[in-house]
Image (tube, rainbow, N blue to C red):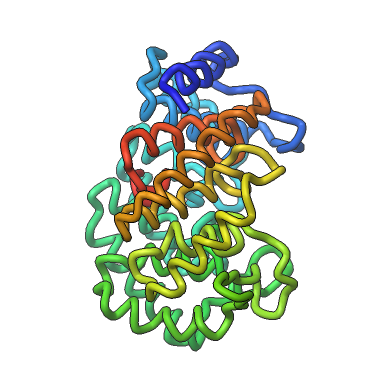
Amino acid sequence: MSDERIAAIVAEAEAALAGVTWPSHELDAPVTPQEELTLYLGAAGMIWSLRRLGSSLDLDAIAAEALRRFRTFQQPATPASLFAGETGLLVLTRADDDRLRELVRSNERCATWELLWGSPGTILAARAAGFDDEARRSARILAGEWERSGGLWTQDIGDRRRQFLGPAHGFAGNVHALRGFLDDDELRRRIEPVLREHAVWDGDTVNWPPVPGYPLDRVQWCHGAPGIVATLGDLLPEDLLLAGAETTWRAGPLEKGPGLCHGTSGNGYALLKTYVLTGDELWLERARSFADAALSQQQHRHSLFTGDIGAALFAQACLDVDDRFPILEML
């Protein structure tokens, strides 16, 4: 792990820019023209990342043009989505706060009840923009839905209804969005029985399925122990924290690549979080070994959550000992 390897990823990303977008990768295909501009897969995510990593590109101008271009397309069904809609670009540019407020308000009862499309994402956006009233209102509604659903939120996504446990589409991400609205002790009280009920132990390791009753087939940030630990680690009882981190370590670098969502970098944040919470140098050593592995897994793939830039962000986080997960904790 080195500054030079991080800089090499930044330089490749800068060189790959084509106008205001980056070429989509075959592993992300199909990517729509709108998705090429968004936070999860597109230009907004790359712009945010390159800002964090000190790029010399005129990122403000690129972001403004990306927003303009996004608005030329027919609006998606969920323009308020932080990760897949206009909201991500508006948080990035702060070009139209009235429109951003409108989207936050329109999304407060989105039936997905999750981070990617739903109100948890727009709560984070509202807080980043300083829209405290809108953030509190959406958080109050999200907390009320938690009460109504009896422990887990129910996600209506497409034509399916499920109850996801991880941060990308369900429980962990929603709980994170309620930080500051409900105090930490209340969150701890509420989440422990849920996570213990659905935990699957194997000796001194623990994992969680994507959905209760599903096969235990993933150890990723989006679904599984890494995401639970990286997102809720400071709220977890010590046994769940350490067992989830151990699961992440034993799974090793992921074959899917270096990305944040379902790759080695995203998993590495669970190890870095555990170091920050415990002070045990073993976890920092392990996190840095994951960073080295992620830097070696380059796919020449340019997106925040699935691409190489995630490895650069995580490697820099390990150098800085900064356990905040991109976007969720540092929008």
Rendered image quadrant of residue 40: top right
How many circles with numbers are drawn on the protein?
0
Q: Is residue 252 left or right of residue 66?
A: right
Rendered image quadrant of residue 117: bottom right
In the image, 9 versus 161, the foreground residue is: 9
Q: In this view, does 296 lie to the left or right of 6?
A: right
Residue at 41% of width from left, 69% of height from top? Answer: 175
Instruction: From the top left corner, tell me how far across and down residue 328 is, in percent.
Output: 40, 51
Instruction: From the top left corner, tell me how far across and down residue 172 is, in percent.
Output: 47, 67
Against 155, residue 116 (above or below) is: above
Residue at 46% of width from left, 39% of height from top? Answer: 288
Q: In this view, does 45 lie to the left or right of 158?
A: left
Tell me if residue 142 can be seen. Answer: yes
Residue at 35% of width from left, 44% of height from top? Answer: 331
Against 130, residue 218 (above or below) is: below
In the image, 305 versus 287, the foreground residue is: 287
Residue at 26% of width from left, 70% of height from top? Answer: 181
Against 132, residue 130 (above or below) is: above
Instruction: From the top left corner, tell me how far across and down residue 177 is, in percent.
Output: 38, 63
In the image, 80 versus 29, the foreground residue is: 29
Rendered image quadrant of residue 89: top left
Instruction: From the top left corner, tell me how far across and down residue 248 is, in percent.
Output: 56, 57
Tell me if residue 71 can be seen. Answer: no
